[in-house]
Image: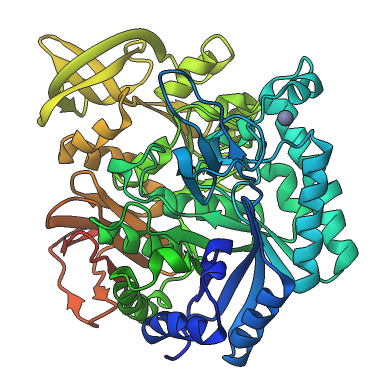
Amino acid sequence: MPDYSNFKVALYFTTRCISNFDSVESLRRGFDFFDKHLNCSKVYLETHRDDMDMSREQLEAMKQFFLGKGIAVSGAITTTLMKTTLSKPLRNETGVYGSGGTIFGSQAEPVEEGYKRSCTTLCYTNEEELLKLEDMVRFSASVFDEVIIDDFFFTNCTCPSCIKAKGERSWADFRLQLMTDVSENVVMRAAKAVNPKVNMIIKFPDWYEAYQETGYNPETQAGIFDEIYTGTETRDSNHSAQSLPRYGSYSLMRWLEKLKPGHNAGGWIDSLGSTPHISYFLEQAYLTLFAKGRELTLFCYSWLIDTVQIPALGHELGRLDQVLGAAGNPVGLSAYEPFHARGEDHLYDHLGMAGFALEPAPQFPDSSGLVFISASGAQDPDIMNKLSNHLLNGSDVCITSGFLREMQGKGIEELTSARYTGRKACSNEFVSEGSAFSGSYWSGSSLLLPVIEYMSNAGDCLVALKKENHWAPVLLRNKYGNGTVYVLTVPDDYVELYQYPAEVLTIMRQHLMGDLKIYLECGGKISVFLYDNDTFILESFADGEAKVKVHVSGNGRNLVDVRTGDVLPVFYGRPNESVFEVEVQPLLYRVFKLV
Ligand SMILES: [Zn+2]
């Protein structure tokens, strides 16, 4: 199968995958399945996970097999151990737990005494476990010139030793420092001592909102490690305890690319939960690559062999490769998500799935253009200066109701008369535009929104939720300096954004996406991915077919369907814009170029 032009694909082998091979012939038979359907140009071979360590002989034999096929070989470590658990009288949890499997009851062979700890990560204040980590790293770096560390490289340990080491600090502060020290002084020092040219990669997990609590520290670790990697396995949001919006497979790639430009080595997906929903598996791959991921890692061999996922993915990757080259560099509205911050978790992902093109970043943008600030932005102690300077320089900001709540009494009064009241409004009628509302739009069900108050005539209410003779602002606008402040009211349950009437979402996009010179006229659950060369991709997360009107600035524009080469006629034109109508279906993204 020919190489892909726009990305590479890697296959991951856990220790359990590797231990299943009893000969090179059995490896050849297994790998043939992947080889038939995909162009796999790299494999990651795990040296340690839970209670399993691979031998040098096993790894060398596999390495030779893949190098003989012209496939690159890298190492991988999963920093977990097997732990036994104590049982409670009325709930039998006795067993041996690891990240790669759980053995309950009488079959459990106790490996060591302990208690059940989520994911069985290491205790990084335990000397014995630190030495074990050092051994894993030394061994891996002695076999491979590149090693990736899977996203269990965190700590949730609350043992007496960790409590003592933490002292008066919060768990987040303690663990952020602890894992920085371990990264620098244990992992990197051991790796480079054994193999100075080894390329060490840290994979960041898909749960960015919780990084600080468990010690993932992108602010320091991106510099300590040679490269970073992105967990884009958002899986089936309906059946996952993590509650990750599917757009996260795109947005985290972009946030981490901004963290270490040119060194976000790829995105990583798995098939968990995608047996009844194969489209979710494929979609993870699309979104990783829409975000311009350089490599797509498939986790893992044992989960994916002889499945329907691989032939389907192979087919779709070939098709995507045909059109992805047309897309330039991703662009969008800046969405500021500072390091170690939380608040309105994953709101940007929901906005992304409601048709806003976003470009998340850990730094406040130094460029012009509208910047989104959600509640997490309140944890930047200098946020008010950054916002006012941005506005004085002539750019716009959109703050959410969550940010407004966090900053009330802390300077936000300088920028807007809007106030977070703590009251709620519940209705299904929306109104819009002007001092005498002209539009009236209906949602299929009643929505619950926080009530924001503002001073009449100190600004404009562009959209409101209405009930009887009362209304609550949904989008407010006022000038500040040379820029504009928008206040966006966010429903308590972010998924209710998708239930906003199409007209309301369209008005919101019309105002907020002005700098991008494009917006969608449609309901929620449709995303637009924008690129810096007048190219964009439409992807639907809805259940059925939908019609989308794409508004672009400029009269007399033409829209080309990149896959077919068909030129779409203008649906209608106005003096300053051209409007196109296109159909989208779930999973069947479309790539367009404006000419
Ligand atoms: Zn501990």
Mark yes or no: residue 332 visible: no
The image position of residue 497, as x and y in percent, is: 26, 34
In-front residue for pair 364/394: 364
| In the depicted structure, whether residue 496 falls above or below residue 133 | above
Q: Residue reaching furthest right?
A: 193
Q: Residue at x 57, y 44 (%)?
A: 109
Coloring scheme used:
rainbow
The residue shown at (28%, 25%) is 474
Towards the viewer: 503 or 287: 287
Q: Quadrant of ligand 1?
A: top right
Tell me if residue 121 can be seen.
yes
Does 149 sit above or below residue 378? below
Where does the image place residue 579, in percent across and percent down from the top left? Answer: 19, 60
Q: Residue at x 27, y 65 (%)?
A: 589
- Is residue 185 found left or right of 117 in the rendered image? right
Q: Position of residue 145 (x, y in %)?
A: 75, 73
Q: Quadrant of the N terminus?
A: bottom left
Total numbered badges shown on the rendered structure? 0
Q: Is residue 244 left or right of residue 228?
A: left
